[in-house]
Image: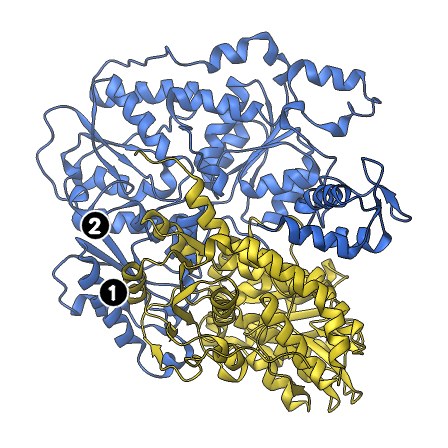
Chain colours: A yellow, B blue
Amino acid sequence: MTELPRLPPSGGCRDTPILKQRGQREVFCGLTGIIWLHRKMQDAFFLVVGSRTCAHLLQSAAGVMIFAEPRFGTAILEETDLAGLADAQDELDKVVNELLARRPDIKQLFLVGSCPSEVIKLDLAKAAERMSQTHAPHVRVLNFSGSGIETTFTQGEDACLASMVPVLPKDDQRQLLLVGALPDVVEEQAIGLLEAMGIGPIKVLPAPRATDDLGVGAGTVYALTQPFLGDTHDALTRRGARHLPAPFPFGEEGTTQWLAAIAAEFGVAPDLFGQVTAAPRARARKAISQASENLRGKSVFFFPDSQLEIPLARFLTRECGMDAIEVSAPFIHKGIVGPDLDMLASGPTISEGQDVDLQLDRARDARADLTVCGLGLANPLEAEGLATKWAIELVFTPVHFYEQAGDLAGLFSRPMRRAGLLKVDAT
Amino acid sequence: MKLTVWTYEGPPHVGAMRVATGMTGLHYVLHAPQGDTYADLLFTMIERRDHRPPVTYTTFQARDLGADTANLFKSAAQDAYDRFKPEAIIVGASCTAELIQDDPGGMAETMGLPVPVIPLELPSYQRKENFGADETFFQIVKTLAKPMERTKQISANLIGPTALGFRHRDDIQEVTALLSDMGISVNVVAPMTSSPQDIARMGAAHFNVLMYPETGESAARWLEREMDQPYTKIVPIGVGATRDFVAEVAEITGRDAYIDTSRLRLPWYSKSVDSTYLTGKRVFIFGDGTHVMAAARVARDEMGFEVVGMGCYNRELARPVRAMAKDFGITATITDDYLEVEHVIEALQPEMILGTQMERHIGKRLGIPCAVISAPVHVQDFPARYSPQMGVEGANVLFDTWVHPLVMGLEEHLLHMFRDDFEFHDAAGASHHGGSAPAASAEGGPAPQTPRGTSGQKKTESGDVIWLDAAERELKKIPFFVRGKARRNTESFAAERGMGEISVDTLYEAKAHFAR
């Protein structure tokens, strides 16, 4: 196959003790994932069963990005719904009937649980089952939880995809399944490379439409494209599918290793692998080396946000020459990010969860050249003179695979370039 | 249960955050699950605040629910006090914490913190953001304000401005100037700009200016009753209302009703002949009650528009809005259902909307120009420049902002005359708005440079490089807002290298070449 990754001589971070602190967590809840999922699945509607806060969150996180009538909404619980639960199921039927009447184009409806619906134990699984029967075969109704008491930010996508796995038809044919919602252009690039190696059939989860013939079974092997898909991973394993562990396809090296894991599984000849990947690899290296010019030798500090932190730290340290001071993720699933941890040279603090005030103290002490954090922290830290990168952009922007490797480096270098360009302060 | 696509107001605890974030020396301990911290970004991103809101969230998770969320609250409150040393603390629950009934107020009171602790009861499943702000400010004032000797000079408190308020920052300055011209000083501006110590000395003012009834009326009423401070009922938005406001202040204080009109331009601009085209423009007005009522008066009396519809999303002000609409001979739309507002606008077919950011979306879809007059706000509603709504400069700003979305006087006639001209047609829009493309499709929006035709090989503008089909298809997958740049870069890359055609590889070679 291709050469194995150079592992850091001083050892990787897989066995680094993880710093765990308990306190205020400055993170989104899983509902946020709806903002990209509803664009990806074009015949799906996401109905959050929750409070005004849920509706306000979706709007605040999405408001500036969506111009069409969105394919998501909130069934806002009111006093009357909280009084008696039998009511709430009837009320929900009413809302769903109204919605489906207005949007006949909807083929998949997701009932999305929220903090309030979890706390009052509103049984959305039961509701989904009932509605599936009522609206079959036209609409399939599923449920998952995006609540903040159970999920953090990108875990919402995980919960959504995991909810789809049990209802996929059984299909034992030999196939490759790519798992994770990616921008179309990126997804097609990956499929193009794999097909050029003679790998197929290739399916994707989530499929753009409910009617796309996606099945799963003992012949399925799957590769995750996002590091936050732990529950989906487990659900697929339960269906007999087999995971191909690999570093995540960020940067030239990550992409090559990720492709190599799949190629090895499908017995692709090394020559062919080299032939298919040589040109895009060279392009990716060139683009990264240009885009990462002002990242070399600079330090980076990651607040926990999207779960992409560990693979991105691997990319920034190994391919862009940065030094990681702290890398934190909302939670760390070594079965999934293990290969990335192996490649990340030991040294940085690895932390899981957070006490935001204590972590801010550490970030202020460290004064990294670049601090990667959520939207709530970015401007306040900029005002303290720290260059920041908002983590949410990493989830919304095409950053996977070879052709985007330069863009990915660019996302990190832009704030630093900008800091160097601006001459607005009194001297 | 109510199906909601967009909401005009957030939950009541966001109102409390607007009060806390506007103030200094106050901290809010909010019992809430993780995820509710999204509200921080309203302030740090939309309003570009350079500090985190002074809010500590307990961020409980599912595993805490069986255990001890009450202790979690107590330790969060203690940590918040120790770290931030506020002069006063407000405590409350978000929608989820309300359901688990931990009673944050009661718990905080038993902790013996050495500063005033003000419990908030904000029913999340009944009330909304404006109520939350109004109630929070009222509780703070009720707890902290004490009767005291009046200032020697006549002075007023300005009541109602909050963080994330629509132009509150600049309105404060404008109203301060109006009062100053009459020889009246400002005692305290609250909640925004004040600290708990400032609240304590509100009783020194002779009267209150209620700038925003949505967020300050309960406090103003209480101060009137308990501190014997009258408050103003007129909100000085527009020329007429500003004059009336000055007269009202004169009556309360006994000072002369003086107003410096040397910078007031709206009356002349409105009379000047170019404005003739504004006559009878049919406008629909929607927003919070206060701004809608002010805008309706300006629209009819100072711009010469015809108000064909008006309404508000905050039921608290439904009554006066209905009364005013009746006076205008129309029926008010009182709703917080965005889709209902959209239906009304579709039915009325106004020539212009004066609304919120939500109506701006509706206008975009229906092709109707829209100027924003009220919250809910967007990052655009916090301009770098001075841009008040109130007072003399506020009136000037209203004239400019309301006229801007419209096609200008003579241009409108020319558009009619040359209706069939290929680049001077109806859909071209106003010339001062730059490259306005015909109405965007709902899905993607306009492409800066749309591919010509859909099949066959395309020549580039320079005419010597050919786009292969696959490359052209690949190009279309690139987001529309960078597609034009990608096309230009690829073409110049190919041309420089003397390449005759552009393949997918060329496209990406170029992309890598230009990567920065």
Locate residue B86, reporting x and y percent.
19, 55
Badge 2 crowding class, 10 Å Cα cut-off, few under 14, some 14 to 19, many 20 or more, is some
- The chain ID associated with circle 2 is B
A227 relative to A98 in the view: left or right = left
Q: In which quarter of the image is the N terminus of chain A?
A: bottom right
Q: What residue did someone put label 1 on? A: B105
Badge 1 crowding class, 10 Å Cα cut-off, few under 14, some 14 to 19, many 20 or more, is some
Q: Between marks 1 and 2, how big is the CA–CA gap?
A: 19 Å
Q: Quadrant of the C terminus of chain A?
A: top left
Locate residue A274, reporting x and y percent.
72, 73
Q: What residue did someone put label 2 on? A: B25
In depth, the one of B184 and A221 nearer the eye is A221
Decide: is B415 above or below A383.
Answer: above
- State the image quarter where residue B248 is shown: top left
Please name the residue shown 51% across and 21% down the image.
B399
- The chain ID associated with circle 1 is B
Specify whether residue B186 is in view. Answer: yes
- State the image quarter where residue A266 is shown: bottom right
Looking at the rendered structure, the kind of residue marked 1 is: Gly
Mark 1 or 2: the one toward you: 2
Q: What SS does tag 1 mark?
A: helix
Looking at the rendered structure, the kind of residue marked 2 is: Gly
